[in-house]
Image: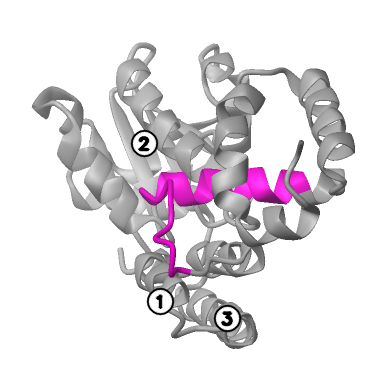
Amino acid sequence: MSPSPGRIASEWLAYIRPHVRPYEALGRGDRRDYIAKLSKRVKLSDNTLRRFISAAQYLEAEGITELPSEARMPVAAVERVARIAARQPEKRQQLLKDVAEGRLTIVELRELLKKSIRAAGKRQRISNPEEPLEKRALAVLEARGVLKRSHAVLATFQDMEHWPYFDSQTNPVVVILLSQDRRIVAMDDRSLGGTAASFTRKRREFLRNILAGTALYDLVLVFASIWQEDVGKLIGAMRPEMRQRVILFGPEA
């Protein structure tokens, strides 16, 4: 006999965790069928169950797979933390801790989210987000003595033969051609973020694309205004020969 919808809602993480891996292993159509059958069994909507899975995936990415019996972590709170983290990733661990320990309510998180959106907009205006990535990238390369801006030849990433090897939602933006055989690829995290599901997925894909870039290009330029810390950790974990191929920079460059 399945637990009641009310009990599942209050203990959603413990309930949904056994379903996360089977769900992830399925294709898009099969996932829809899986959720539909689960929805019929537990009397919860498809959307509710998808929110449970997305929130569980986000928490797992932050190292949380179970909660102490006294902790409270509503799905709506996880979703709001994820949206705040899309703009202020350095706050996510403390926010999750405060929610679990009862120091932050969903209403308070809603206000923090509004503030984070306003602060992100202000930061973007200050850092001149309209300046194209290629202009920033060329300035960084010139400052490091790699090339002169006037000598750069630019190409659209989708025109290169390597594009099928990258995750499409977070793929590089521009390729700088040094010669027929020497190429630099530039990436940008400014358009990423969003819901709990998209934040977790796009962050993972963005980092994975950096790794792909180091295998396929001479240099990988990474403009990170949101995920500086995450990209920095990835670079620190790379082998030295790969680490030397990545240049991380941000709005201050």
Badge 3 density bin: few <14, some 14–19, many ≥20, Cα 10 Å:
many
Q: In the rendered image, is residue 55 in sight?
A: yes
Q: Position of residue 140 (x, y in %)?
A: 29, 51
Closer to the chain start, of discs 2 and 1, is 1
Cα separation between marks 2 and 1: 56 Å
Which residue does the numbered mark 1 point to in the structure image?
101
Q: Judge whether 189 appears above or below 25 on screen.
A: below
Which residue does the numbered mark 3 point to in the structure image?
109
The residue depicted at 45 percent of the width and 53 percent of the height is 135
Which dot, 3 or 2, sits closer to the camera? 3
The magenta segment is 49-71
* Left or right: residue 211 compared with residue 95: left
Badge 1 density bin: few <14, some 14–19, many ≥20, Cα 10 Å:
some
156 magenta-colored: no
**Amino acid carrying mark 3 in the image:** Leu
Q: Secondary structure at mark 3?
A: helix
Cα separation between marks 3 and 2: 49 Å
In front of the other: 151 or 163: 163
Which residue does the numbered mark 2 point to in the structure image?
151
